[in-house]
Image: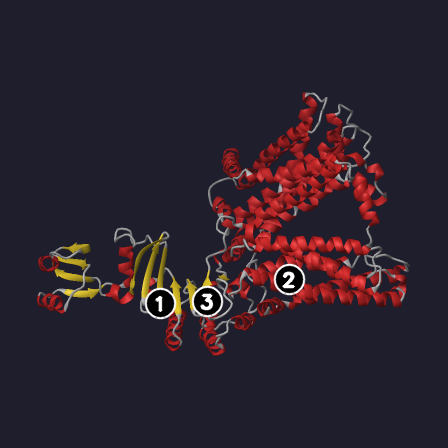
Amino acid sequence: MNTHFFSDTSVMTRRSLRHITRSMDTIITVTIMPIAFMLLFVYVFGGAIQTGTDNYVNYLLPGILLIAIASGISYTAYRLFIDLQSGIFERFHSMPIARSSVLWGHVLTSLVSNAISVVVIVLVALVMGFRSSAGLPAWLAVAGILALFTLALTWIAVIAGLSATSTDGAGAFSYPLIFLPFVSSAFVPTATMPGPVRAFAENQPVTSIVNTIRALFEQQPVGSEIWIALAWCVAILVIAYALAMRPTGARSPERSRGSWVATAPARRRSCASSPRRNSRRPAAFRFSAPARGERRDPAPSRAGPRGPGLPDIKVRQALRLASWFYPNWSGELAADARRGIELPVGRRIGALSRGMRTALGNAIGLAARAEVTLFDEPYAGLDAEARQSFNDRLLADYTEHPRTVVLSTHLIDEVADLLERVVLIDHGRIVLDAAADEIRGSATRVSGPTAAVERFVAGRPTWDRRTIVSQTSVVVAARLDDGDRAGARAQHLSLEPVSLQQLIVHAAGGAAAPTADESREGALA
Amino acid sequence: MSTWIKVARYQMVQRFNYVTLPWAALALLFAAQWAVIAMLGMHDARLTGLVAIYAVFFIVGASTVARSLPFGLALGLSRRSYYLGTVLLALTLTAVDGLLLAGLQEIERATGGWGLGMFFFRVQYILDGPWFLTWLTSFVALTLVFVYGMWWGLVYLRWRRMGIRVFIVAQILALLAVGLTADRFAAWPNIGRFFTDLTATGLTGVLAAAAAALLVGGYATIRRVAV
């Protein structure tokens, strides 16, 4: 497999680089913090810091570059984590490509993106007064050291990306790395520091790297510092590389399980409703789609089974506290609904499955007995029995306590029998608004011998004509009176009512596009 | 008003976060620091463990409040009543906790620093006056960190990761702007004098003004939160 290593790595690198060109904001966010630090230190604190040079930008720049790299590599961990979680990582591993090329693609991308940030920061520093007398060899040496440093830290990022369980965790490992430069010679000479801090500062990698780069920029002899710096970089690189390469193969199966658990909340429904305070005014209860931004930005959904969006409370508590807010609350109904769907009252609502969460929302929505209740997708994740039980309960309570209930759903047949009025919304446009009874009789499927069918439907509007050999079946889009029905029977034609779902599919764009359902709403009014 | 109390009750369902956690953190740090000092035989040790309760209040403000909002809205609350109810709860909690801190400070004085000459609840300059000033300063400072934390949580809820990044950068830039302006007008000596002349009570006033500003900021943010 090694023969493919270079071509595979180049493909992987190009893929990963494309991610960067598609989201340049990552480069911006990486460069903006070091630049802010540079501005802060040079213009605000600079006057107070004694470094023994007149040009503080010159003194500061090497440390700032290291901070930029330390924060830049956290994106490698982030991207790698996203790859693992979305499953593309395993998909790559299932292909006949060199295994390590997947990681190397990310690592090389990190080199490129960090090089871009470094160049941007150096340009800003030039504007702020950074000057160097260094020649080409010195600049190349600086570039080499920075590249080695990036490489070493990136492999640490790879470990973090492979072992993280959340995006925040994947990014958090870089914080100590970002703050290492603060306890080094990057901002102030170590000689001014108190004893133990100084001992740490003088023996940590950043100081030697900073001193080396600074010496190179100023055309000073670099001395032994450069060897210490290189030794640090190589040591970190080797250890991190060895650790990062170890788990990639063995981890996969476990990883896929982990990622399933982690992505499940992405489809979580959060409960939400319009603000209402008293029952005199129409109140609403609805179940919103995933929180805004969740679909475009995958990050918030990654927070694990108890992520943001749901408080840390139990089902029992959720039902109890809901009762405080609805004056017409029916404790009986809530208890009944809870029993019917076997909600585990002791479980935290953040740990409920999708169906259970829907069930809890339905229980609250029913028990609230608000004047207007809006159920948004009340069947999501529910099994047939639970759906039936919800329908029965809703109908029974509605009969006893008439009120306005809006059911917003994609599953039309499920609610067909409940509806009094149907409003069909297709891509935000109302395409149908009629009483359900009116719609139900408005079309009939006529089937039988082709000649007889044609005679029967002549002059009537029709759609969805299907002919098999000598038999034809067609929908007549008109009300049939008793005479029509008797005539049809005499000719041995069969008449079937067209289901609400089919009528709605037709209304939404015709039989040609039966799946064009974006948002279907039915109302029980 | 009654809706606000209902909101406060709703929040108190998670009373572990609001009541137990801050005091547990404080007790833990107190015990640890007391033990260390007793073992090392130090005297007049000035300790920083008190900061734990502030840290917890910040974290609770940032996490719990934001997490409870979507479900709160599901229960028919308006953003306004949710915010004001939560602030009401925060004010109550910080008032009570401030009183407890003031009481503990008195005990610390009376027992000569818990028998070890320890300074845990007394902090030089800011928390070193009579009990009512300690209460006032603790009340204001705890409210400040809570409201500040809440604002972080709301920014996350509204604009997610990108919002947090912008929020951080904006705060750095704001500090930078203040610094540059002070630099430009050579105002550092005056600023220094302002702070050295400021009494602890005066500083409490400054903190109260900051808390009020943060309250307004959080309110402006919660109105824009979509769930």
Subunit that carries the residue with mark 2: B
The numbered mark at residue A297 is: none
User: Can residue A87 be seen?
Assistant: yes
| Circle 2: element type | helix
User: Whole-Å distance between the Cαs marked 3 and 1?
Assistant: 15 Å
Which of the 4 image quarters holds residue B14?
Answer: bottom right
Subunit that carries the residue with mark 3: A
Picture coordinates of residue A251, whole percent (x, y): 56, 51
Picture coordinates of residue A254, whole percent (x, y): 54, 54
**In which quadrant of the rendered image does the C terminus of chain A lie?**
bottom left
Subunit that carries the residue with mark 1: A
Asked if labels 2 and 3 share a chain, the reply is no
| Label 2 Cα crowd, 10 Å radius (few <14 / some 14-19 / many 20+) | many
| Circle 3: element type | loop
Residue under label 3, please give it.
A283
Q: Amino acid at mark 1?
A: Leu
Out of A160 and A103, give the one closest to the viewer.
A160
| Circle 1: element type | strand
Picture coordinates of residue A306, whole percent (x, y): 57, 60
| Label 3 Cα crowd, 10 Å radius (few <14 / some 14-19 / many 20+) | many
The numbered mark at residue B87 is: 2
3 vs 1, front mark: 3
Q: Amino acid at mark 2?
A: Val
Out of A524 and A485, give the one closest to the viewer.
A524
Q: Is residue B16 left or right of residue A6?
A: right
Residue under label 1, please give it.
A524
